[in-house]
Image: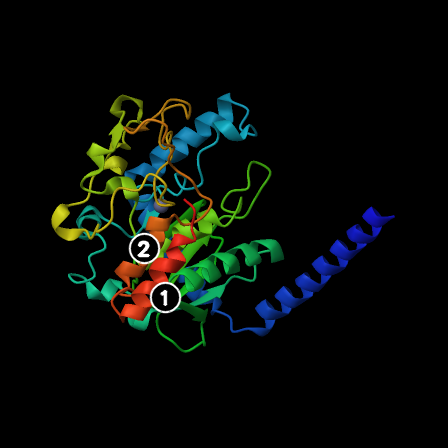
């Protein structure tokens, strides 16, 4: 009896949530269809321009032809699939990659006044919408960066949109100027894609804030070993390091970072390791939540620790809550 009433309650709650979310999306400001089409075409051209896109497509076709692709363990990680620089970072060429996240040198890549207007696609289902909202709220809570609803007028804003091609989870790095997409593929029969939890939306949004992958730090060879022979041919450049001159890395190397590759990223058969931690017992590639250092890193990057002694103490204390 108790079980049945709790189930009914859940159904009611879900219905209520659906109505609330649907109205929030449909009554809100929408992005012109043409803007989305232009942005998607631009992203597709960029992804096709990287040789990796074709290589990865071939690889996925091979899996389709020869394996039971429904077995998720054989599939590609949704951060590898887009075929951009290092898998999921759009609009990055080698030169840009090496400029990294040093906002002193490239101030235009930083979001103005630490404010990020955003809009979520109405194509997302209520639970996917809520996961994206949660990621944004986490960033608002743990940092002085302010994500808020786009007012329909501001020039620079993020659009969370499930782009079909290139599929997967991907983002541009830092502020581009104008509308910019963070693409999160919706779940399908093969896998949860970008929505197994809040981790992947957080990861891609951190790229949009200007953060690169942890293992591309200049000092990474002291902490992880790249097993070059196990990397898919043509993808070794995904394991390049960034230039010391251009990257801000004020914190110690972070195995727990949500921005770190997993052990088998870009592995020839998805089972052999491409990246091995040098410290025994460490695991890498978590997509659960920000680590303590991710939190500090973002606050440092956006000047939250420099605003005042109070602000510094506040955000350092808040970051301590993150257990990783
Ligand atoms: Zn990434």
Image vertical order of residue 128 relative to residue 264, above or below: below
Which residue: 35% across, 57% down? 208
Which residue: 57% across, 58% down? 130
Image vertical order of residue 109 relative to residue 90, above or below: below
Residue 89 in the image, given as x and y percentages of width and height = 33, 48
User: For ligand 1, which image quadrant applies?
Assistant: top left
Q: Is residue 122 left or right of residue 224?
A: right
Question: Contact (CB < 8 A) between labels 1 and 2?
Answer: no
The kind of secondary structure element at disc 1 is loop
Say which quadrant the C terminus sits in.
top left
Which residue: 25% across, 25% down? 228
Residue 120 in the image, given as x and y percentages of width and height = 50, 63
Between 293 and 41, the residue placed more toward the observer is 293
Residue 215's image quarter? top left
Disc 2 packing (10 Å; few <14; some 14–19; many ≥20): many
Residue 1 in the image, given as x and y percentages of width and height = 87, 48
Q: Nearer the viewer, mark 1 or mark 2?
A: 2
Between 9 and 231, the residue placed more toward the observer is 9
How far apart are the two marked residues, 1 and 2, measured between alpha carbons? 12 Å
Q: Which mark is residue 228?
A: none
Q: Is residue 56 left or right of residue 278?
A: right
> From this viewpoint, is residue 166 visible?
no
Q: Is residue 145 left or right of residue 99?
A: right
Q: Which mark is residue 145?
A: 1
Residue 148's image quarter? bottom left
Residue 250 in the image, given as x and y percentages of width and height = 21, 51
Q: Which mark is residue 296?
A: 2
Image vertical order of residue 155 relative to residue 250, above or below: below
Identity of the residue furthest to the right in this view = 1
């Amino acid at each position: 009896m108790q079980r049945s009433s709790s189930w009914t309650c859940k159904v009611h709650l879900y219905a209520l949530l659906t109505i609330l979310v649907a109205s929030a999306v449909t009554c809100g400001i929408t992005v012109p269809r043409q803007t989305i089409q232009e942005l998607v075409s631009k992203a597709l051209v960029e992804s096709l321009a990287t040789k990796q896109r074709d290589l990865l497509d071939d690889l996925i076709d091979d899996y389709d032809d020869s394996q039971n692709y429904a077995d998720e363990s054989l599939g590609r990680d949704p951060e590898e699939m887009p075929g951009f620089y290092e898998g999921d970072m759009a609009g990055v060429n080698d030169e840009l990659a090496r400029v990294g996240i040093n906002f002193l040198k490239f101030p235009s890549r930083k979001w103005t006044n630490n404010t990020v207007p955003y809009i979520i696609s109405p194509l997302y289902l209520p639970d996917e919408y809520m996961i994206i909202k949660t990621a944004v709220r986490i960033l608002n809570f743990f940092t002085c960066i302010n994500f808020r609803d786009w007012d329909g007028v501001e020039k620079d804003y993020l659009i969370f949109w499930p782009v079909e091609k290139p599929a997967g989870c991907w983002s541009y790095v830092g502020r581009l100027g104008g509308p910019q997409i963070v693409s999160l593929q919706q779940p399908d029969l093969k896998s949860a894609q970008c929505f197994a939890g809040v981790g992947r939306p957080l990861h891609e949004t951190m790229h949009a804030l200007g953060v690169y992958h942890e293992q591309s730090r200049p000092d990474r060879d002291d902490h992880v070993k790249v097993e070059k022979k196990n990397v898919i041919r043509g993808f070794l450049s995904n394991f390049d390091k960034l230039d010391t001159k251009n990257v801000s890395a004020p914190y110690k190397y972070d195995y727990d970072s949500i921005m770190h590759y997993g052990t088998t990223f870009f592995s020839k058969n998805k089972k052999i390791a491409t990246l091995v931690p040098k410290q025994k017992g460490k695991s890498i590639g978590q997509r659960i939540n920000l680590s303590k250092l991710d939190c500090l890193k973002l606050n440092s990057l956006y000047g939250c620790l420099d605003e005042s002694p109070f602000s510094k103490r506040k955000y350092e204390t808040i970051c301590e809550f993150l257990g990783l």
